[in-house]
Image (spheres, coloured by chain):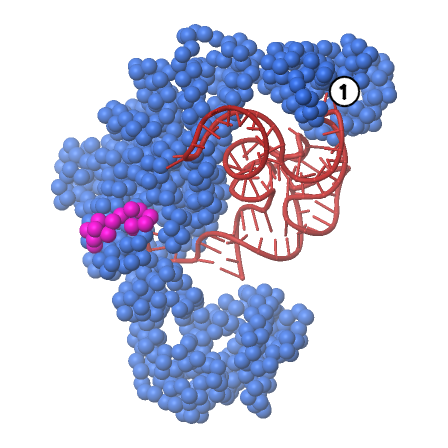
Amino acid sequence: MDEIAIAWQKKWDSAGVFEPAVSSKPKFYLTAAFPYPNSPQHIGHARTYTTTDIYARYKRMKGYNVLFPMGFHVTGTPILAMAKRIAQKDPDILGVFQDIYGISNETAATLTDPIALVMHFSNEIEMGMKEIGFSIDWRRKFYSNDPAFNRFIEWQFRLLEKKGYIKKGSHPVPWCPSDNNSVSAHDTKGDVDPTLEEVTLVKFPCAAGGFFIASTYRPETIYGVTNIWANPSAKYSKVSFGGAEYYISSAQVEYFKNQFADLRALGELDFKALSGMKVSNPLTGAPLPIVPATFVDPAHGTGIVMSVPAHAPYDYLALRDANLPGINMINVIALAGFGAFPAKEIADQMGVKDQNDPKAEEATKEIYRKEAHEGVMAIGKFKGMKVSIAKDKVKEDLMSQGFALKFHEIANSPVFCRCGARIVVKNVIGQWFIDYGDPEWKKLAHECLGAMAVLPEKSKGDLNYTLDWLQKKACSRAQGLGTKLPFDQSQIIESLSDSTIYMAFYTIAHIARKMPVEMLNDDFFNYAFFGTPLPSGQKPNSEMEAARKEFSYWYPLDSRHSGADLIYNHLAFFIFNHVAIFPRGNWPRQIVANGFVTMDGKKMSKSMGNILPLRKAIVQYGADVVRFSVVNGAELKEDSDFSQTAANGVSTRLRQFSALLGMACKEKPGATDNSLAYRWLMSRLHSRIAQSESLYESLSLRELGQELFFNTSNDLAWYMKRSQNPRLSEFFKLWIPAVAPIMPHIAEEFNVLLNGEKAGLVSTSAFPQADKGMIDTALELMEEQVVNAKFDIEHILEILKMPGKPKSITLFAASEWKYSLKSIVAKERNPSAAIKAAMAVPELKKHGAEVPKIVASYMKNIGSLDSSMLGRGKEIEALKDACAFYSAEFGCPVTLALEEEASPEQAAKAKNAMPGKAAILVAV
RNA sequence: GCAAGGGUGGCAGAGCUUGGUCAAAUGCGCUAGCUUGAGGGGCUAGUGGCUUAGCGCCUACGAGGGUUCAAAUCCCUUCCCUUGCACCA
């Protein structure tokens, strides 16, 4: 099977089928998210590309000039990180390479240079894409660190900057203090993604100047603060930053410097000195005593904690444990089912012993959740407001009055860098942003999305949502491969920001590659993409003209494909940047987002070792089986399971198709079959092909596979059984091109076998046109009668458990009056009305005793009555036609009779005959 | 926590938008029989329960309740799961 695939790939290649030229034909331009070559690709990656390729091939067969290019994304740090890990001989990585990808340690040893790594894996990926038969135009391949591409990105960023979308500022990031770099999942031990969360630092003014600061998630409870907790054995420091002085635990001074760059330590003091200070509540002015508490962790937050005993079980318990007189709880939040001091109540209810009781944690969670959801403010400016809303209001108020600061923590702390250091939060200053929060820009993005098709349609909502919540996005980093920011050479443009409009670059990539890099200036890109005349007044050279022509022809992008995970970033950026850079006429037209691939029901992961590399899968199953299997497991959006047994099943079916094709090839030309069964087969095929067009269009590939492959295979099996003289060549003539987009190699091979060497390529032929005239629903219902009657006979024979063959079998078609009754019921749709109407018909009145019973049975399936109505004549015709078939099947004469002609001894069985259900009499 | 999507048979996965044709497509798995086929094998049948010369009946579509002649399908409540919440590919 593999040699066949390779042979056809060579033929496509030498015919240049996938290297389209600008022409007068209508074009279809589609791209898939380019791969990131830091490891080989597996069948999961293949899903997106196979989906894209099927679409490309389908559109090609529908007469479009199709462009499907591919490149490689090498921007950012993961490649560097990978090369570094290989250089360090990280046993995990080497193990994965060896065991899963079959990369020897010797080969791995050559991949310690990032560029060598990129070249190795990109070649590997490219070969895989060729071996699976993707219809890619490889002439346009590029890497995102190619000088030509760098120039393109610089051009894009100068444009964004000119439009005012680039901003500078500061923002918090997860940071390794030892590596001095921001970190993300691939930099951490265990690939943990460090997540940030915002907390509020509330400032409590000291009479002597400066502030105590306490970190809290619940700024709204500030009204209820009764005291301040500090650890009696900890050291505290006076520090200054942002123009004010603060007291925090000495252990946290360094930590705080990460987020307050100008922080300076002004000297240490012990708890005694600290506790002597007079501190007050910033909102109420109430004095707050400083109380020692060992539960306060000096290495967490500020080492100073505000105490809200009415609403925080820990604070209540600590106060109770300390047995302090003179501190009265203050109610802040009204909570249904609780009194003024919910923390006390829940602690008492649950019988929490003291602050060290594990139940204290439980009580805290419970009361925090309840208060956050159902609580209402009982005090202060926002009295009567729901806590969930007041929370932010209080915070804003505090901030604007200078009584609060924003602070960030690692929510899933502790997270460790691969170097061993604990990840902190750092406020990076001088950070460049793309401002996706710009309201005008958002409006344009929404306009674009609104006019765009999104498959599956459900994902449009997600995209819409993403467009809305996107704000300033950091677009540069200090390290990594990629393009330098044109207006800040110390910064590399971050990987999600340099891959937003590269689809435009494909259109000219093969031209730009051959040009001297210095010619790829803004004038060149402005001309190629906008047609802007050269400022010098000179005439554009031939390369510029060619580039302009390519872009004008291929753009806009007709379909953009990626995994569904990119909806929340890349695909949204893709829309934003297109509307920022290009005029409306060149905005993208469609997005297709597919789910992932699981492996025998489990998520593929390095740790589980259940990754199936694509090239290995191709060797094992063959290109077309892999293509089919990765897209047929589920509908577009859902995760698709690649099951080994299912893939084997596909191979088996293909062999069956192949065997039948062999029969078709031996048929005399022009030989036909006029039987009901043949007409039935063709009716089914035509209706499936008719359906397949919309299934291809909506990329409902699972259903498509069901229709064109499994169901069609079942049709064929039935036909082969049913027909005495099967004819298959007409069938295959239609079927082969219909499945060609999914299984192109087999389609080509079958086509040559059936039609000879001169048949031409299926890949460039026209998609088959279904003949509506061949679709006959009555015929299909008739065949259903034949199937049903066969099933019934089998059932009876089984129950009879006869030793030999029956002597004969007689089928009885129901009397005419039963059909009349059925249509009356279908019309009346109501039992009593139907019986009344039936009794009015003399012919039916004769059978008055049976009528109510029959009506009742029809009523149960009233919904089916309309569609399953086949006249008596048709039913008789179908069964009569099938008698010869039945005789052969059951090894005895099978005849059809009419109910009303039944002899008295037959009558008992014959009266069971109903429309759509022949009565059966087996003679032993 | 917030937001979105989902919970169907041993598994995967249709159907639910337009309530009745649904004990529920199709694939896989499993069971039995056949085929002298033996290292991804083929064919046939079966695969909720009870029954029966094909009928039929009961129980089922996360749980509970409701609307309706009729609900996997509509409404409400509740439990559970998945994904996203960014600066990272």
Tell which subunit mark 1 falls on: A
Residue position marked by numbered label 1 in the rendering? A912
The image quadrant that residue A764 belongs to is top left
Residue at (56% x, 86% y) in the render: A321
- Tell me if I can see residue A474 in this picture: no
Q: Main secondary structure of the magenta part?
A: helix
Question: Is A430 on the left-hand or right-hand side of A909?
Answer: left
- Is A18 on the left or on the right of A696, as rendered? left
Examine the rendered structure and indicate whether residue A229 appears above or below residue A111: below
User: In the depicted view, which residue is nearer to us: A794 or A41?
Assistant: A794
Tell me if residue A53 comes above or below residue A182 in the rendering: above
Q: Is residue A268 left or right of residue A312?
A: left
Q: Is residue A638 magenta?
A: no
Indicate yes or no whether the magenta region holds residue A104. yes
Task: Report the span colored magenta.
Answer: A97-112
| Residue nearer the viewer, A898 or A252 | A898
Q: Amino acid at mark 1?
A: Asn
Above-or-below relation of A885 to A47:
above
Which quadrant, please, contains the C terminus of chain A?
top right
Between A881 and A336, the residue placed more toward the observer is: A881
Q: Label 1's element?
A: loop
**Which residue is located at x 39 percent, y 26 percent?**
A740
The image shows residue A26 at horizontal and vertical percentages of: 34, 26
Q: Quadrant of the N terminus of chain A?
A: top left
Identity of the residue drawn at 48% across and 8% down: A672
Residue A454, horizontal then vertical, whole percent? 44, 39
Give the total of numbered labels: 1
**Chain B tint as drawn:** red
